[in-house]
Image (spheres, grey):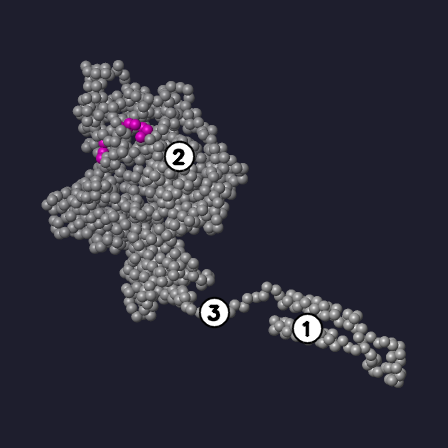
């Protein structure tokens, strides 16, 4: 059945052809492929030139094979099943047979870069990613069509819940539900694109494309030759320089006026031959930068430049540049194989990319590719071309600049994604230095002429293309204008961290969209290499969360606050022990959970993956607020938040704190596809939530993975993050090693001994340090010594420590032999050259940086020991790196050796002293009782013996011998004899008439003598003890 096609569809196609603008059609339905033929026919009628070429992109398989013989077999099978009438010619089959169609798998989409097509067909919507969307749409020329095929849907809002292929990569064991927020925003943005129409498989326009109702046919002002104003200007420019060599032939290859002016600027700098110019070419994707550079290099060859070096992140990026070098020199009447040869790469990974062109028409000339981090090999260079400079780290780009002609090209925005640190920092610096030629400071590039060129006109389509504007808005590509100037920079202590609700952020409301563009602008302005796929990761990944640092918010003003810092966090861990053991046994790491799996692999530990943690994916600060403490404040607040210091909630299980799920199909009414009204969701939660109002996830650690540089490592180390892994192979693009660091959070679930700030990570950090030190002489031999010393973080100041040797130090004899000590002594006394002890330096350096030799060294002395002992560098390398003279380095080295020798000699002397024979010393062991106790005991013994003696003397029988018989008579006689008076002593003698008992007397005298002898000896011994 024939049906009249809606005139608005034809009008849209014709308007696109007239204005050289692209148009986009989204066809919903299982029979959508049949309408491709009709759209292609309408496009062919509108285009004056030959039939438009077609690019057909798909995921795995086509309904009809792209191979002719296979397609014939498929048609035969369809006829046998009765699905194809052989008498009726299928228009689609004819279209496939006769059309000039290029088929491309999504995974091979890189090979279509640089090609141009009149129509692009995208099927298998679930396999599309933002990168693929931009890459394929960019190949369509002005006036061409982009057709997106969707399978039959009951409602367009079912895209909100469609499971995309990329979601498989976003899921982890603990976070398995991915939300299709990007699809929701994609569908809502289509409704606002003026050059996009959504229709069913019968070409009925759906209500979402209601804007097309008022479409009118446009008229274009053209001259008699059919040229627009810009095309006439370009033609006049070519005619003006037609007879000038080498400018004329090269300008003839230019496609736009902007490109022609850029080539003239480059050639002016080349023909000047002062070699003091730096020319920067800034443009968006598809403006012809690489082609302009290639034509300029061809002009340099014609001008006689001998050594031309070209650098880019990869030789594959230079495909267009080398192609236009060949086109340029061919236009200058050079012949391949006769005047020049093209050298292809032998590396299979580079797919035979051109790496060198040798020219020998006038004299030997070379155009050679150079890796960015091989800047030390730049010798005798006259012209250096840096393509895609924004994708190369800023320090490397700075080191590439020198006293020669430099051409820079950079993509400000585009689907490959770049950081704008180049245009924001380096170009501003070069521009300011070129204005101060007199202040020529050594090491800077002042006094050079600097020129910046911008290309605004696209090669494939005209300016103002609506598809380009829509795509830039959808993928946040052109966000340079979204970096607002901050009126007031608050003190970091006044700032607060807020949680960003992603449902609201990607809802396509006007305020949410502005906030999203500002967030992405900070990412692009930072040092990260950005990609449109990052936007889908931010939107859909279930484990990712966003935080922003804002100053004091004035709620009375109805405006969005300034974003000072953005942090993107990915929750990781909570992997079952069974999965960890399986991963270790198989040696396979699943997608996601980078830090747990890497930790599990490095330490063969199956417990750590079961812990929960968060990896800081990105942290970007506003370019006007760098190095003011906002990044540090954001990290500190995030740490406190996950430690539970910012919230006052009671303990809640993790299941209870999940974010409430918003019903994404609430906008879909119970209506057919032709009556459905698509609009942004209502009743969304607040965009920003203060951290006090949100319960934190329970985490054990925070982690970061980044390219290892001194500034970044210093920043994270300042916040007590400890490294546990550094990749052995540096990045081919940046030359940086991957570094992963961790910080333990205060958590009651892990028992930790007294291990300082590193917490439960202390033993792992110690093991990492030992492994890193052992690899410094081989794998990390080329690592910057300052960075390597920062990673190792060994103590070099022992002034506050008592001079006691560490117990872990081996005996000196195990480290150094007596002959080694003699050689070391001879060197410290200036009797031999330092080459005599080079074999001892690694031994001493390892012991010193393991803090087993507590000798205080200055930082410069420690650096010399580090370079010579651990990294095995020679004096020449140290001289270049430290900017010191050879004599100074040797003076520092001998001072280090003297200190270490003195310390080792002291240890060896003590060891020898401990082995010498010595006199046996008399041990003066103390008594078990005190002197007072001993005297008291002796006194008791004397008293007891005295008592025993007195008992024998006072015996009545013994005393009877002294009794007076006539008591009164004898006393009277004695008194009379004395004259009746007593003597002065008061004693009176009366003679007894009884005989003494001689035997008894003798016995008493003997016992008395013995007592006296014993008592005397005891008194004498007591006197000795007291003395």
State the SS at label 1. helix
Which dot, 3 or 2, sits closer to the camera?
3
Tag 1 residue = 1011
**CB under 8 Å between discs 1 and 2:** no
Q: Between disc 1 and disc 2, whose residue precedes?
A: 2
Which dot, 1 or 2, sits closer to the camera?
1
916 is higher (above) or lower (below) than 651: below
Q: Which residues are magenta?
A: 115-127
Coordinates of residue 360 in the picture (x, y in percent): 13, 49
Name the residue at 17% across, 45% down: 343
Name the residue at 41% across, 26% down: 679
Q: Quadrant of the C terminus?
A: bottom right
Residue 116 lies in magenta, yes or no? yes
Characterize the local packing of mark 2: few (<14), some (14-19) or many (20 or more) Cα atoms within 10 angstroms: some
Tag 3 residue = 920
In depth, the one of 368 and 412 nearer the eye is 368
Coordinates of residue 311 in the picture (x, y in percent): 24, 47
Tag 2 residue = 173
Name the residue at 40% across, 41% down: 606
Residue 770 lies in magenta, yes or no? no
In depth, the one of 896 and 687 nearer the eye is 896
Q: In the displayed image of the protein, which residue is found farthest to the left? A: 338
In space, the residues marked 1 and 2 are separated at their CA atoms by 100 Å
In depth, the one of 99 and 911 nearer the eye is 911
822 is higher (above) or lower (below) than 380: below
Q: Would residue 641 be found to the left or right of residue 32 on screen? A: right
Coordinates of residue 395 in the picture (x, y in percent): 32, 50
Q: Between disc 3 and disc 2, whose residue precedes?
A: 2
Q: Between disc 3 and disc 1, whose residue precedes?
A: 3
Splitting the image into 4 quarters, where does residue 893 fall?
bottom left
Characterize the local packing of mark 1: few (<14), some (14-19) or many (20 or more) Cα atoms within 10 angstroms: some
């Amino acid at each position: 059945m024939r049906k009249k096609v809606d005139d608005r569809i034809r009008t849209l196609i014709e308007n696109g052809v007239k204005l050289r603008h692209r148009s986009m059609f989204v066809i919903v339905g299982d029979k959508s492929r049949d309408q491709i033929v009709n759209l292609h026919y309408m496009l062919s009628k509108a285009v004056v030139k030959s039939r438009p070429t077609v690019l057909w992109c798909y995921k795995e398989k086509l309904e009809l094979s792209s191979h002719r013989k296979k397609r014939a077999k498929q048609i035969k099978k369809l006829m046998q099943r009765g699905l194809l009438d052989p008498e009726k010619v299928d228009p689609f089959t004819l279209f496939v047979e006769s059309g000039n169609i290029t088929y491309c798998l999504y995974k091979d989409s890189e090979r279509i870069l640089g090609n141009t097509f009149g129509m692009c067909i995208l099927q298998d919507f679930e396999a599309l990613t933002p990168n693929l969307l931009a890459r394929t749409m960019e190949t369509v020329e002005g006036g061409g069509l982009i057709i997106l095929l969707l399978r039959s849907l009951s409602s367009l809002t079912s895209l909100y819940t469609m499971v995309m292929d990329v979601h498989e990569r976003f899921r982890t064991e603990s976070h398995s539900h991915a939300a299709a927020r990007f699809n929701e925003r994609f569908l809502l943005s289509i409704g606002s694109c003026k050059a996009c129409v959504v229709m069913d498989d019968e070409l009925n326009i759906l209500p979402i494309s209601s804007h097309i109702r008022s479409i009118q046919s446009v008229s274009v002002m053209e001259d008699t030759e059919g040229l627009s104003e810009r095309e006439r200007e370009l033609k006049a420019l070519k005619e003006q320089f037609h007879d000038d060599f080498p400018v004329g032939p090269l300008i003839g290859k230019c496609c736009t006026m902007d490109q022609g002016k850029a080539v003239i600027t480059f050639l002016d700098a080349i023909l000047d031959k002062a070699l003091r110019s730096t020319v920067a070419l800034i443009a968006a994707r598809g403006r012809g930068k690489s082609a302009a550079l290639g034509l300029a290099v061809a002009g340099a060859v014609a001008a006689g430049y001998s050594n031309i070096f070209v650098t880019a992140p990869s030789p594959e990026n230079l495909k267009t540049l080398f192609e236009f070098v060949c086109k340029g020199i061919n236009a200058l009447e050079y012949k391949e194989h006769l005047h020049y040869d093209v050298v292809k790469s032998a590396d299979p990974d580079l797919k035979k990319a051109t790496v060198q062109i040798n020219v020998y028409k006038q004299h030997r000339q070379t155009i050679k590719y150079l890796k960015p981090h091989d800047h030390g090999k730049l010798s005798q260079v006259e012209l250096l071309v840096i393509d895609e400079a924004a994708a190369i780290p800023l320090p490397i780009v700075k080191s590439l600049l020198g006293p020669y002609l430099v051409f820079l090209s950079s993509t400000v925005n585009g689907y490959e994604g770049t950081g704008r640190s180049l245009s924001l920092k380096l170009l501003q610096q070069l521009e300011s230095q070129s204005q101060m030629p007199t202040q020529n400071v050594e090491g800077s590039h002042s006094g050079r002429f600097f020129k910046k060129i911008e290309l605004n006109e696209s090669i494939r389509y005209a300016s103002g293309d609506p598809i380009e504007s829509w795509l830039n808005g959808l993928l946040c590509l052109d966000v340079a204008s979204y970096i607002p100037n901050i009126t007031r920079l608050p003190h970091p202590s006044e700032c607060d961290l807020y949680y960003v609700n992603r449902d609201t952020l990607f809802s396509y409301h006007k305020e949410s969209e502005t906030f999203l563009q500002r967030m992405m602008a900070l990412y692009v302005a930072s040092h990260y290499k950005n990609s449109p796929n990052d936007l889908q990761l931010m939107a859909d990944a279930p484990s990712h969360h966003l935080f922003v640092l804002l100053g004091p918010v004035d709620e009375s003003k109805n405006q969005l606050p300034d974003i000072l810092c953005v942090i993107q966090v990915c929750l990781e861990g909570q992997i079952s022990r069974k999965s960890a053991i399986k991963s270790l046994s198989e040696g396979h790491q699943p997608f996601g959970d980078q830090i747990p799996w890497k930790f599990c692999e490095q330490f063969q530990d199956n417990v750590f993956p079961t812990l929960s943690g968060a990896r800081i994916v990105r942290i970007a600060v506003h370019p006007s607020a760098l190095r003011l403490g906002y990044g540090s404040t954001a990290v500190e607040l995030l740490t406190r938040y996950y430690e539970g210091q910012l919230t006052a909630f009671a303990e809640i299980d993790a299941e209870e704190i999940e974010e409430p799920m918003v019903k994404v199909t609430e906008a879909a009414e119970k209506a057919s596809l032709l009556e459905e009204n698509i609009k942004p969701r209502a009743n969304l939660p607040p965009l920003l939530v203060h951290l006090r109002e949100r319960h934190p996830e329970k985490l054990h650690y925070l982690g970061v993975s980044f390219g290892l540089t001194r500034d970044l490592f210093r920043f994270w180390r300042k916040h007590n993050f400890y490294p546990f892994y550094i990749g052995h192979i540096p990045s081919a693009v940046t030359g940086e090693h991957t570094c992963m660091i961790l910080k333990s959070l205060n958590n009651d679930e892990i028992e930790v001994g007294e291990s300082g700030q590193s917490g439960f990570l202390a033993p792992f950090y110690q093991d990492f340090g030992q492994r890193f030190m052992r690899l410094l002489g081989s794998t990390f031999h080329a690592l910057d010594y300052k960075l390597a010393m920062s990673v190792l973080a060994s103590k070099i100041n022992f002034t506050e420590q008592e001079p006691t040797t560490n117990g872990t130090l081996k005996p000196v004899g195990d480290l150094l032999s007596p002959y080694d000590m003699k050689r070391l002594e001879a060197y410290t006394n200036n009797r031999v050259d330092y080459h005599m002890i080079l074999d001892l330096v690694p031994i001493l350096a390892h012991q010193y940086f393991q803090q087993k030799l507590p000798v205080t060294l200055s930082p410069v002395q420690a650096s010399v020991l580090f370079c010579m002992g651990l990294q095995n560098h020679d004096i020449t390398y140290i001289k270049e790196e430290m900017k010191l003279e050879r004599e100074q380095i040797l003076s520092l080295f001998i001072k280090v050796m003297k200190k270490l020798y003195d310390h080792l000699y002291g240890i060896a002397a003590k060891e020898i002293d401990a082995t010498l024979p010595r006199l046996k010393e008399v041990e003066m062991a103390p008594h078990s009782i005190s002197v007072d106790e001993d005297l008291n005991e002796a006194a008791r013994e004397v008293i007891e013996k005295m008592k025993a003696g007195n008992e024998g003397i006072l015996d009545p029988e013994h005393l009877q011998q002294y009794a007076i018989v006539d008591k009164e008579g004898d006393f009277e006689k004695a008194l009379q004899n004395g004259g009746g008076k007593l003597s002065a002593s008061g004693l009176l003698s009366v003679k007894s008439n009884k005989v003494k008992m001689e035997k008894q007397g003798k016995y008493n005298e003997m016992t008395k003598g013995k007592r006296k002898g014993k008592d005397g000896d005891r008194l004498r011994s007591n006197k000795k003890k007291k003395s």
